[in-house]
Image (spheres, rainbow, N blue to C red):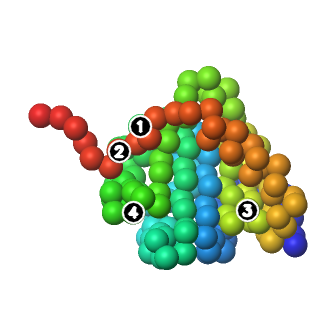
Amino acid sequence: MTSRLLNSWSEYDAAVQEILDLTAGTLLVFDADLSPLKLERPERIAALRRLLLGAREFNKRLTIVVQKTAFVRQYSPQLMDLLAVYSPAMTIIHAPPHLDGLKDSLLIADHRHLLVRFHQDHARARLTIDDAPECAPCVLRFEEILGAGGDPLSSTTLGL
């Protein structure tokens, strides 16, 4: 049970990888556009794929809520490929407009590991490892964000 403050983008980046490596069953993500998480890196895509591989047998789940979808659609082809392959266990949701005022970012693994960035424009964050009671308020906040609705992203592009 550890918790520490992070003050730089390099610390934040290392913490993202740490959370992804610790994820065994459920990963919840809320972010403006996912760009600071750098999920397209090979090691991060591999961690997400490992999570989703046993989804059917072990009830694993990846839920992502973004406020802006342009970055995901244009610069995250591997993430969109994962959505196409593992759509029953993976969801990416475009948050409704009334949530645009939220400026924090959440990365919650298994309801006991947490990385919360206090403002989407800054690296200042808190990393909590193996502390479910400490993570509980952020899990509840994520569930409220998810409950606000939104439109699921599709892995297929419609058009002529």
Rendered residue at 33%/63% (across/down): 85
Quarter of the N terminus within the rendering: bottom right
In the rendered view, would you say 135 is above or below 50?
above
Cβ atoms under marks 3 and 4 closer than 8 Å: no
What amino acid does circle 3 point to?
A: His
SS state under label 2: loop
Question: Mark 3 or 4 closer to N-term?
Answer: 4
In this rendering, position of residue 45 left or right of residue 147: left
Name the residue that disc number 2 marks.
Answer: 154
The Cα atoms of the two marked residues, 2 and 3, are separated by 26 Å
Is residue 101 something that shows in the picture? yes
Which quadrant does the C terminus fall into?
top left
Across and down, in percent, residue 48 comes to: 50, 68
Snapshot quadrant of residue 61: bottom right
Whole-number angstrom distance, CA of label 3 to CA of label 1: 28 Å
Q: Earlier in the sequence, mark 2 or mark 3?
A: 3
Query: What's the amino acid at mark 1?
Result: Ala
Kindly identify which residue carries mark 4: 86
